[in-house]
Amino acid sequence: MKTAVTRFFRSIAGKVFCVFTACVLALLLFNWLLNTVALARLNEQKSEALLTGAYTDAVDAIAERKHPAHVLEPYYTEHGMSIVIRTDHQVIYVIPQPDTPVFLSQPYTPQTNGYRLVEHDDQLSLYGKMNGVYITLHLSTNEQTTGASSRFLWWVTLATLLLSCVIAFVLARVFTRPVRRLSDMAARMAHMDFSDRYNGGGEDELAELGHSLNTVSETMEQSLSELKTANARLQSDMEMTARQNEARSRFIRNVSHELKTPISLIQTYAEGLHENIAGDAANREFYCSVIEDEAAKLSQIIAKLTTLMQLETGGDELTIERFDLSSLLSRLLQRYAPLFAERAVALPTLSDEPLFVWGDALLIEQVLTNYLTNALHHVTEGGEIGIGVQPTERAVRVTVFNTGAPIPEEDLPHIWESFYKIDKAHTRAYGGTGIGLSVVAAIMQAHRLPYGVQNVPNGVEFFIELQR
């Protein structure tokens, strides 16, 4: 269990305390080092520069045979420097006037031309000689320290101020960066954007807040996703329900309409037989044939409706297998050969080479049967029906073409609907039900494979695609 001290030093308050304490200690250490090392050295360099400058000015004045007072007096008045210039026999210049003869003594008299600096107690002295002239300069370091220290401390204060500003700026950026990060994240969440995540490290309060916001964001994102999914599903279900209701109503209307005619005919001719209206045997034969034809149409409509309902409700499961498409097409053409001959249409010529595809063979056969039946019903007398097989690497496209009038563009999207008939009189003439293409659409949708129709020059072409 974390102690209170540990929690404090891991918190923002503890971090701020430690950082600023360290900064203050660092600044104090910095000032101490400057005062004890740099300031002493600065004073020493300043004093040496003043002494050597005064010595040079004195030598130049003597060399030019000028009295040195006018160049050396400022060193005394401004810096408190004591100056003695003499020879072995006389004193040339002294400032200030000494109280005792000891002041005139020169314990470090150079033997050759030049000078040397000697530090003793709180005084720095220069002892020099130039062509028999002795120059002695004394400068109190205490007096220099006062002025130099004032200037030095002013610069130190300015430097400390600038350094403090830099440190405060850096610390402000460091400590406010996660706060700004969390603020941006919260703003995104307020606008329903939960994709952002806080990835800052640490174990302080901001880190805990960031992790909490991450948890909230993840939960809200998941909830929002589930809500959108549920809403989309609900909307889809409502639309589907509406479509199903509309389709059911249309289906009932169409079924009622389609069944009305054959039932009425069967009823009428059956009553005629019952009332013996037909009379002779030929008429009775005609009445019976009409009843048989209409009963066959009813049976055909009911069979197709049953197939369509099973496909649309998923009650009839697919049996996916690999089968020979070429063999299936060959059987279909043999079966429909008499109908082709009746319409004076030549049978298409297909390759006998095996071509294997995947699908429910019985249902695919029903699709192609409906396409051929549709083509035979709409082909022009003596026209052409063509079957195309176009294999690719992964699929086979099967087309059924017939010459004849094109399908109006406004009717193309609707031909797959149940009981939709473009030319009702023509459809009635050959006994069509308007369900065949609906069965095709249901079968191909169950396979999740492409199908369609398009107007082409001189006719219409239907197609499906099968996987290899």
Image: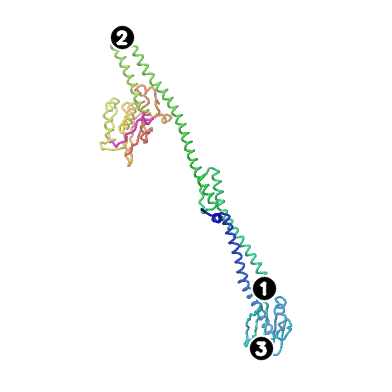
The location of residue 105, given as percent across then percent down, is 68, 86
Pick whichever, 355 or 180, lies toward us: 180
SS class of the residue under badge 2? loop
Quarter of the image with the C terminus is top left
Rendered residue at 64%/64% (across/down) = 158
Q: Circle 1 sits in a helix, a strand or a loop, which is it? A: helix
Marked residue nearer the N-terminal end (3 or 1) = 3
Amino acid type shown at disc 1:
Thr
Looking at the image, is mark 2 or mark 3 nearer the viewer?
Answer: 3
Q: Is residue 197 left or right of residue 334?
A: right
Residue 384 appears in the figure: no
Q: State which mark lies toward you, 1 or 2.
A: 1
Q: Quadrant of residue 291?
A: top left
* Residue labelled with disc 3: 132
Mark 3 crowdedness (10 Å alpha carbons): few <14, some 14-19, many ≥20:
few
Q: Which residue is mark 1?
A: 145
Instruction: Read off the magenta span.
Output: 310-323
In space, the residues marked 3 and 1 are separated at their CA atoms by 34 Å
Return the x and y of residue 359 as percentages of the image width and height. Answer: 32, 35
Examine the structure image and report whether residue 196 is included in the region drawn in magenta. no
Checking the image for residue 279, the label placed there is: 2
The disc, 1 or 2, on the residue closer to the chain's N-terminal end is 1
User: Which one is nearer the viewer's eye here, 179 or 55?
Assistant: 179
Task: Specify the label residue 199 is tagged with.
Answer: none
